Image: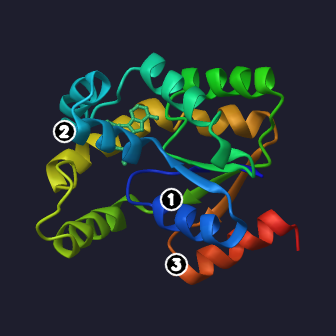
Amino acid sequence: MNIILLGPPGCGKGTQAKLLQERYGVVQLSTGDMLRAAAKEGTALGRKAGAIMNEGKLVPDDLIVSMIAERIEKPDCRNGFILDGFPRTVAQAKALDAMLEEKGLRLDHVIELDVDEKVLFARIEGRAAEAAGAVRADDNPETLRKRLAVYREQTAPILPYYRDKGRLQQVDGMQSIDEVARQLVVIIEGV
Ligand code: AMP
């Protein structure tokens, strides 16, 4: 089962992806987590990505696409994966389509968590407070503002890309974590 979770930073994609991972035994593939791990290790990709991430900008498509192409070949993806934070541009969405076709894989669900931007600020501030000591360098109001602008300009156009293909499903991400999780299960299990 292969799923894409879409939505702006702070919409709850990561939280829901982890819950789906536990429930269905599929792997959460968070490109943000992968890049942060690479930055921590100090790999060539990590060094390049780290600076871009701290500015709230997007890492170049070709780097991200090859990172994901490699990752979904790993044995733990055999049962499926939840893409969290990818694709983030129409070019990435098209590259993903081509990649899946080449590998004989398909997307089962493309789900947007729809949220109100004002509430996102409160959430990100809460996340920064919770993680005291281990705060993400890009979890601050100034960078969030940039990340939201990048989302509107570069990522939101992938919503009509999937909608036009009849693939886009939506869940109201302003509800409680449990309620969002419940509605995702309804979509996935078709009940
Ligand atoms: P996230 O944890 O998903 O919020 O991602 C954190 C940062 O990693 C983003 O602000 C980007 O700089 C970078 N990033 C994550 N995923 C992607 C992607 N699919 N394309 C480009 N940049 C990405």
Label 3 – label 2 distance at C-alpha? 27 Å
- Toward the top, the furthest residue is 62
Among numbered discs 3 and 2, the one appearing first in the sequence: 2
Residue 98 in the image: x percent, y percent? Answer: 72, 20
Label 1 – label 3 distance at C-alpha? 10 Å
**Label 1 residue near ligand 1, CB within 8 Å:** yes
Dividing the image into four quarters, tell me where ligand 1 lies: top left
Q: Is residue 86 left or right of residue 36?
A: right
Quick one: 95 or 145, which is closer to the camera? 95
In this rendering, does residue 63 appear at all? yes
Among numbered discs 1 and 3, the one appearing first in the sequence: 1
Kind of residue indicated by mark 3: Ile
Kind of residue indicated by mark 1: Lys
Q: Which residue is mark 3?
A: 177
Mark 3 lies on a secondary structure that is helix
Mark 1–mark 3 CB contact (< 8 Å) = no
Mark 2 lies on a secondary structure that is helix
Q: Which residue is mark 2?
A: 54
Q: Is residue 58 left or right of residue 129?
A: right
Q: Which residue is mark 1?
A: 13
Residue that appears at 20% across and 66% down = 128
Q: Quadrant of residue 123?
A: bottom left
